[in-house]
Image (cartoon, rainbow, N blue to C red):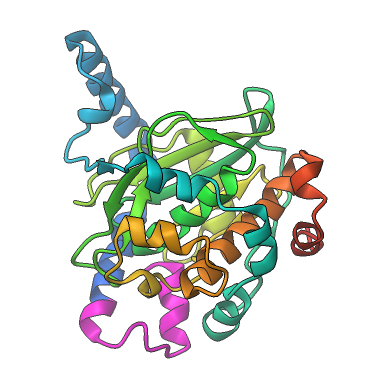
Amino acid sequence: MSKAARLRERNARKLVATQQAAAARSERRRRAIIAGSSVLAVIAVVAGLVAARSAAGSPPAQAAPGGVHGTVLPAGVASEITTVPAATLARIGTGSVPRYQNQTYAGAPLTKVSDTPLTSAGKPEMLYIGAEYCPFCAAMRWSMAVALSRFGAFTTPLHGIHSAADDVDPGTPTLTFYGARYSSKYLTFVPVENENLSRQILQATTASQQAIWQRFDSTSSGLAYPFIDFGNQSVITAPLYDPAILKGMTWAQVAAALRNPSSPVAQAIDGAANYMTAAICHMTAGRPASICSAPAVRALGSGL
């Protein structure tokens, strides 16, 4: 059972109303636990498969066993996701995140941590570990896309998928970061979609990623999705809003709602994106100033 699901159940939220859903979450948690002894074996298998496919001339992104990599979003939809106006984000501020946190979780949206700075390619690294089937990851990918687009650009088309149909909040519309490429002067984004919709290994974590995950998100029940590390300075280990808010929506409907400050979708997704923006600004030492010096961003990062 994931950390987010356990806390939701503990607080008797209506989001988890049946024993069947609890059983599904327990199975998800069981699958999310990755035995350290198996990591190297999985990496070896994946590396072998990628090498074989490369030799055959097939793109690795199409060849992962059981992988679901979604539908390329229309350019207009992708643009609405990646160009949410700064004025809209400023107006939303914290959005509905504090209300959701107070009702459902203990603690703050961002957790301050301390470790050797996490860097990649000479820049601070934002590490995301999730799974394509996971509804909580489904919620957070929207916010990550909005926040990251303020600091750089995705250089591969955004792909849309839906979370698993046999989990809580079934079929949540979302993105997948499997095979995604991102470019920024200020940070490196490293996404790991650990499992696919069938709960099979899609991307194995490296030994260093596994160690970070275990250090900052390990509980007596094991590891959980989603996990987002901002340069080893702060982490997010639970969804910042309820995935159920996206129920029945299309990718285009979600994207369009992001620009309406009064929309519950924008209040949730953009509010969470603002927290992520503050965490990114903290790890980039306030760069760029055009984003990081905004009063709303400074206020959200004050505790970091």
- Picture coordinates of residue 237, whole percent (x, y): 53, 61
Quadrant location of the N terminus in the rendered image: bottom left
- Picture coordinates of residue 230, whole percent (x, y): 64, 46
- Picture coordinates of residue 245, whole percent (x, y): 39, 74
Q: In the image as oriented, which residue stretches furthest toward the top?
A: 55
Looking at the image, which residue is at 32% across and 42% down? 74
Report whether 286 appears left or right of 142.
Answer: right
Report whether 186 appears left or right of 3.
Answer: right
Looking at the image, which residue is at 66% across and 71% down? 108
Q: Classify 112 as above or below 95.
A: above
Closer-to-camera residue (126/80): 80
Q: Classify 128 as above or below 299.
A: above
Range covered by the magenta-colored residues: 1-22
The answer to whether any part of residue 170 appears in the image is yes
- Picture coordinates of residue 93, whole percent (x, y): 68, 67
How many numbered dots are placed on residues in this image?
0
Report whether 67 appears left or right of 235.
Answer: left
Looking at the image, which residue is at 55% across and 71% down? 267
Q: Is residue 20 magenta?
A: yes
Looking at the image, which residue is at 49% across and 73% down? 263
Quadrant location of the C terminus in the rendered image: bottom right
The answer to whether any part of residue 93 appears in the image is no
Q: Classify 292 as above or below 120.
A: below
Q: Is residue 45 magenta?
A: no
